[in-house]
Image (cartoon, rainbow, N blue to C red):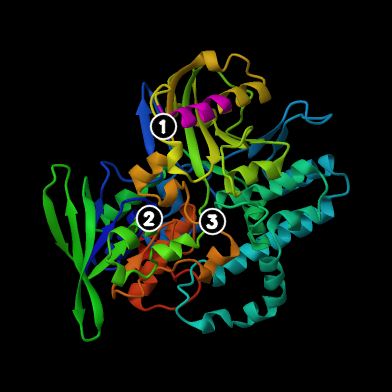
Amino acid sequence: MSRVVVIGAGIAGLATAGLLARDGHDVVVLEKNDRVGGRAGTIERDGFRFDSGPSWYLMPEVFDHFFEMMGTTTAEQLELIRLDPGYRVFRTPGATDDTTPVTVPAGRDAVTALFEELEPGSSPALDSYLDSARDAGVMAQKYFLYNPFTRLRTLTAPEVVRALPRLFTLLGTRLQSFAARRFRHPVVRQILGYPAVFLGTDPRTAPAMYHLMSALDLDQGVSYPQGGFWRVVERIEALAIGAGARIVTGADVTGIQTRDTPEGTVVTGVGWVDGAGTTFRETADIVVSAADLHHTETALLPVSLQSYPEPWWARRTSGPGGVLVMLGVRGALPELPHHSLFFTEDWDANFDAIFGRTPEIPSPASTYVCRPSATDPDVAPAGHENLFVLVPVPADVDLGHGGTDGAGSADVERAADAAIDQISDWAGIPDLRERIVVRETKGPADFRDDYRSWRGGMLGPAHILSQSAMFRAQNASRRVQNLFYAGATTAPGVGVPMCLISAEIVLKRIRGDHSPGPLPVPDHARLSTEHS
């Protein structure tokens, strides 16, 4: 049994703590904030409960596998509701002859019918696209996502070798052009391209390999965990504690401590301070940082021990920043389903504003809106609605902080006002602004201060080709033995499922397991599941 310190109690930190504690290690988690969850946060005010982070429950098989590794099942931990419709797409009013919102239903057959309505004759192309997306997703989980990339031979399996010509095509083609070659309708192309934003990148630069994301929402469908993603956080935290992990909040790690040995530099623990400024030292045989990798490398380690020093980051591409707007609204909002996407007509201009040479807040901006109160009555008081609005913006801390009831920075609040007016106008809710009774915002500077996010980004490094799979920052320090990394800023990437997978990769690294796919579920985990 090793003594393990995990830095950060976000999804990845909690999942890592649970897996390692269940594997027999003595685990303590140090979290600088006064709550767990990291970017999967929550805000409660006046009877409203807002998720201030993830809101799309995708890749259910990853959650299923993690819960099984913890000796339980998704069904025991979460109440999932399949959303139908999956989401609705709103378009710029007056931009074309037909700007009727497009409602994307649940289930492949219904989606096929929708695409056929939008673009007659497109059914065969969609079938082929979704079959390809599903196959790419299966291949990714078997050989790439769970792979610690510690053995080259894991990429020479016959199935991978046979697929190499296709893989090279998918890696060498961009997602937007991949969809554009197969479909003409602009909304169809946007529906197939928007998942790149979930990966923190521009569909014009994301590899076409990521068309696998379309198998998640258009084929598998979209679910919602009752209680929101905060419920997911609570269950992962409870499982970690149940496995024996200890969690200390208000514990701000100030440095990773090491010693030199004839075999190299070895981690020995961490230093941390509490809210009163009292300093502590936590000894450890193993340290896992689930904090932002840029902060871990450049602030918690001396330059001589950094695997990813500041010049390395200068050559990296950040995902977008975000202006988050959480609104409590009086009265019903039937115009909005659980998920809505507001797509601008000039798609390229929107992404140029975020990722281009002269970044600025897009105007108008392609915006995402979640109305969890459409599904979950507990997130808002009776007679009210809960709205979460995400405006992707440049990763730029100079845009400032959010605040309560309009008290954030001028840039953040202007973006929030523009989003409210956009929703009101495009969705046909003329009195939306007057019905707002609660307003909370967050900006890029909040991501920097709350989560130590590199450049104030909301997700992490963008999933361009040079920052994906084996090309992404990996899960172990190259300079310090027994120092490991988990979370969205390392491999395999951004999103809650990827954070769960990163925890399993750390478990593999510590065990010395070089296998490329999900670990077999232990017999004792199966037995505990069967008897629970």
- Reading the image, the residue beneath label 3 is 462
Q: Which secondary structure lies at badge 3?
A: loop
**Span of residues in magenta:** 408-418
Q: Residue 292 carries which label?
A: 2
290 relative to 303, above or below: above
- Secondary structure mostly seen in the magenta stretch: helix
Q: Which residue is depicted at the point 83% across and 48% down? A: 184
- Reading the image, the residue beneath label 1 is 402
Residue 410 within the segment the image draws in magenta? yes
Q: Which secondary structure lies at badge 1?
A: loop
For the residues bearing labels 3 and 1, Cβ distance under 8 angstroms: no
Camera-side residue of 216 and 10 = 10
Q: Which amino acid does label 2 sit on?
A: Asp
Mark 3 or mark 1: name the one nearer the start of the chain. Answer: 1
Residue 215 visible:
yes
Q: Distance between the residues labelled 3 and 2?
A: 14 Å
